[in-house]
């Protein structure tokens, strides 16, 4: 267990994928041969795949690029042979904030949480390896948190002091400024930490704002006789405004479920100073071979990311959508509400309504690269379509204009 | 509900039993006709008996006189027609202190707690009215605390802030001095408060150190849509040393299960300056008709309290045990270990061993006023008996000496 490890010391350069875009790994004793305090040594152990935890509360439906940073690292660890343990915090999301003081954490119904979880999984499907056996474990934390009784919760609370909890970034300032901190807020780090105990995590991924919570997980694992997990922290992504962190409420975000064209259009305007970080955190492209001009870099970034979530063809169409080669079709000649197959036919991309119906049914018709195969789809207003790229097959497309 | 109450305003003098020995009642608006803020008005309402809560954690077996102060108030309220809700904190006692740092609150087994609860009930039987229907409800808080899940506990925690909790006497100083306060300690006031919700208490009794916890109960009752309870606080009894509060660990206590003679002997030495408070808190004697000399007061107090817990006869015997009229019997003539019937016979109180056996069997033989009816009882050493009063029937008794 020890001798073989020190002789098998992996050179860090072979693990550049691990360090890419990482702010901090803890514990981190890079010269140590002890796999308990050196993640490189731990990864070199081949006794079993490591269990790499990443958790998210399905409180909302839409995921943005900021959320993908730890997910992409999770994928890299899957590709290195380890097991991604994706925790959907259905319990924590459902509890919400019982004080009702925070709009963000209002109480969700079980149905909303189930719906959000499904939408969430649909969105992360392009990022994670869902298919290779043993590489992905999806867990819902109601499985263990729902079973905790007062005695167990008391045991969790007894592992920490008020002083330790108040030292947490976020609490310290509020306490000093005498802004109320409600007691249940102390439960969150412990619940997240207990997730690590429940899934026996070897590594937990998170944003730099998760250091405290991941450290609580280490303490709880020690308390329950487990080896404490490593923490791997990644930066919080700056939003498209180049100033504040990417956030849905600030409007400076790029959502994974956005259509390819608006996604492309947002990304090709990313401020120059963010480009390198975006490439580092959101793509696998080698950073020493990026295009020379900022404009080319913006286009490359936009293309690469649209490709990740909508595929090569949609990325190409989105790129073309910005050239003058794209013919336009004015929706002013169409009477709304209008059936989709009629619009496809009227656009001239099909010769007749019946051809349009058939191509839609075959799955060959797309809006902004997203397949639309519902024949009976009805659009109520031209605004639902204005600016979007309508395509039939790979070669025929128009931009819909008003 | 309101008109009848204001007209039925009860004169406080009629409730002198209520105020006797009380440090504080809250809320307390003595001039208000609102039964929500004036306990006298509330007691005057005759819609239903009030539910008067008193809780104790059965963490130890022995109860001392300090514990009886709120119990005696509970009895007064029973006698006024209300329902005593006696809560045995079997859940809180069993949880104990999971940090294992406090000897006092080590984890107890279910058996120990059940045993302690039974011993506790045996001891309080002379104080409370166990017999009148509807006057006593004995509840174990595992009934509701054992059912709490994380969502409910979160809801309880969310009713309070860290600042409010740290304002609690005991926490404030420790926090200021940077002595660790473990998070689970915050649960106790909430658990005690939730007990009030569970039993729908109208009034909670406690020592003056319970004000915070009783107030938490009020807040939780409001949160759950109940009318908040009144708090009735009573002094903490000073121990027989006249200095520190009565406590088993300080050795300055009088236990309810103590034999009548040592109980009497301790009480007849109570320092003068404590006498009035002892009379007020531990007896129903009118305070303006106490004996004149301190010595007589001490004897009266000792007699009165021994009478409460061991009956009139034992009190008289204990008092006689201190006069010179009591003949002595020296145990030096007895060979130990010795059977009890033999000692009774040897003492001369019975004419023969067979008479001794018979009187024991009939229940007529007592040690310090406590009946001993086990014929086969064996004493290993004379020290177990030295100083005790042995009596057969009502008129024959000796003091056992070495």
Image (cartoon, coloured by chain):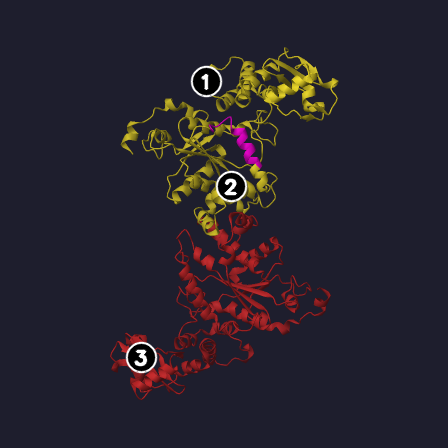
Chain colours: A yellow, B red
Image position, residue A386 (x, y; %): 68, 21
Q: Which residue is mark 2?
A: A172
Q: Which residue is mark 1?
A: A286
Image position, residue B124 (x, y; %): 47, 70
Label 1 sits on a secondary structure element that is loop
Determine if marks 1 and 3 fall on one subunit: no
Residue A402 placement: quadrant: top right
> Is A118 in the magenta?
yes
Q: Residue at x 56, y 32 (%)?
A: A119
In the picture, the quarter occupied by the N terminus of chain A is top left
Determine if marks 1 and 2 fall on one subunit: yes
Of residues A32 and A8, which is closer to you in this image? A8
Which region is colored magenta? A115-130
- For residue B228, above or below residue A227: below
Numbered circles on residues, count: 3
Q: Which residue is mark 3?
A: B340
Label 2 sits on a secondary structure element that is helix
Determine if marks 2 and 3 fall on one subunit: no
Q: CA distance from mark 1 to mark 3?
A: 96 Å
């Amino acid at each position: 267990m020890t001798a073989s490890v020190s002789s098998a010391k992996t050179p860090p350069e072979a693990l550049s994928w691990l360090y890419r875009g990482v702010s901090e790994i803890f514990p981190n004793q890079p010269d140590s041969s002890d796999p308990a305090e050196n993640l490189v040594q731990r990864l070199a152990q081949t006794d079993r795949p490591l269990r790499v935890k990443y958790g998210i509360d399905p409180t909302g439906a839409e995921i943005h690029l900021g959320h993908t940073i730890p997910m992409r690292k999770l994928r890299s660890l899957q590709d290195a042979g380890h097991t991604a343990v994706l925790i959907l915090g259905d319990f924590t999301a459902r509890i919400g904030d019982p004080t009702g003081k925070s709009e963000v954490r209002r109480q969700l119904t079980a149905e909303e949480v189930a719906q959000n979880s499904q939408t969430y999984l649909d969105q992360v499907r392009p990022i994670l390896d869902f298919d290779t056996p043993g590489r992905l474990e999806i867990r819902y934390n109601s499985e263990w948190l729902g079973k905790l009784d007062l005695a167990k919760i008391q045991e969790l609370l007894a592992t920490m002091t008020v002083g330790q909890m108040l030292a947490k970034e976020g609490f310290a300032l509020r306490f000093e400024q005498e802004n109320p901190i409600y007691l249940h807020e102390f439960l969150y780090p412990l619940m997240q930490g207990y997730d690590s105990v429940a899934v026996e995590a070897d590594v937990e991924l998170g944003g730099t704002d998760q250091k405290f919570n991941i450290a609580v997980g280490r303490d709880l694992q020690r308390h329950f006789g487990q080896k404490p997990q490593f923490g791997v922290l990644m930066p919080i992504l700056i939003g498209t405004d180049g100033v504040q962190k990417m956030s849905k409420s600030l409007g400076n975000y790029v959502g994974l479920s956005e259509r390819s064209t608006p996604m492309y259009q947002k990304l090709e305007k990313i401020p120059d100073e963010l480009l390198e970080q975006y490439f580092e955190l959101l793509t696998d492209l080698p950073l020493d071979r990026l295009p020379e001009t900022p404009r080319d870099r913006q286009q490359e970034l936009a293309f690469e990311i649209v490709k990740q979530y909508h595929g090569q063809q949609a990325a190409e169409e989105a790129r073309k959508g910005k050239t003058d080669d794209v013919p336009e079709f004015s929706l002013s000649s169409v009477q709304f509400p209008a059936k989709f197959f009629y619009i496809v036919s009227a656009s001239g991309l099909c010769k007749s309504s019946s051809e349009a119906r058939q191509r839609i049914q075959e799955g060959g018709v797309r809006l902004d690269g997203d397949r639309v195969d519902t024949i009976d789809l009805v659009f109520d207003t031209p605004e639902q379509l204005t600016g979007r790229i309508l395509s039939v097959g790979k070669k025929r497309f128009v931009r819909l204009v008003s």
